[in-house]
Image (tube, helix red, strand yellow):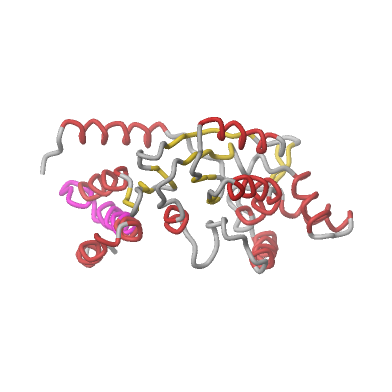
Amino acid sequence: NSCTGKQALAALKINRLLENKKPRPVQEPKDALRRLHRRLAILLLRIAPPDYLHSGLGGRSFVTNALSHVKDMPAIKLDVKRFYPSTKWAHVFRFFRHQMKCSPDVAGLLATIACFRVNGDSHIPTGSCLSQILAYYCHKTMFDEINNLAKARGGEMTVYVDDITISMPDASPADIRRVGRIITRQSLAWHKQRFFPRWVAKRVTGTIVKSDHIEADKKHHFKYRNTLERVDDPTASIEDRSRAARSAIGILQSIAQIDKRQAQSAKGMSVKLRSLAI
């Protein structure tokens, strides 16, 4: 089926964004250090998390994060900029020293184990299983303060990695700056700020949130269509087509998680695609 002019233009914009996206440096611990990071992550995950945290936890996901904002309320959204590289050795040390009550030498050792050092700068790595939960706990007091602000005004805040979303009956653009000041006091920066009036659908962690349900973002559907074209490309190698089929299955499963109405059709298409995937 041919796309409308608006659909084609939107697809072109999405493709350009994907093509122009700069690759992020990944610092991944190896061997013994990786095992230490995994052990620390397991121990931190044993701590009962707050209701507002939805990332990296069993039974919670980007979907539960979005569902928390299916409310007839305006909302604000902003991201912590460069969350992992901005979480420094000092943040990690303070967490182990003051929150976990470790002795100074133990806190320093754990911070050194947990952080990546390059060009005189030491921060938590971008490719470790420990980084997500550790970054949260290093800044928990900040997230708690923002959550208390939202609760005091009859709203709800959620956190998904570095993504902060707040739905409140009286939310306004001024609240973005108010939350931003709390973030900067933690020696962090913020960006990608958005205000969603009551009558506007909210874009939250890859979904479109409406007053009574959530939907998959259009970019997921465009990405799926583009992947299907690679699956059906007769000039492509078997390896490329099978790789595209596996990618298409993943996108379909993600869409079905968001929109249960499409779960059955996604299941049928996944069966068909699996026959093409090696």
Instruction: Name the residue: 54% across, 39% down.
Output: 79
* Quadrant, the C terminus: bottom left
Q: Judge by depth and name the residue closer to the eye, 12 or 227.
A: 12
Residue 122 shows in the view: yes
Boundaries of the magenta span = 230-251
Task: Answer left or right for 55 relative to 219.
Answer: right
Q: Judge by depth and name the residue closer to the eye, 70 or 35.
A: 70
Q: Judge by depth and name the residue closer to the eye, 158 or 237.
A: 158
Instruction: Name the residue: 21% across, 36% down.
Output: 7
Q: Could you tell me residue 253's position as x and y percent? A: 32, 60
* Quadrant, the N terminus: top left
Residue 273 shows in the view: no
- Residue 166 vs 97, above or below: the answer is above
Q: Quadrant of residue 86?
A: top right
Q: Could you tell me residue 14's position as x and y percent? A: 32, 36
- Residue 278 vs 251, above or below: the answer is below
Give the main secondary structure, helix, strand or loop, of the magenta stretch. Answer: helix
Task: Answer left or right for 32 relative to 223.
Answer: right
Instruction: Name the residue: 33% across, 46% down.
Output: 217
Task: Answer left or right for 122 relative to 128.
Answer: right
Q: Could you tell me residue 19's position as x and y percent? A: 37, 34
Task: Answer left or right for 21 relative to 225.
Answer: right
Q: In which quarter of the image is residue 33?
A: bottom right
Q: Judge by depth and name the residue closer to the eye, 7 or 202.
A: 202
Pick out the residue farthest to the left: 1
Instruction: Name the residue: 34% across, 48% down.
Output: 210
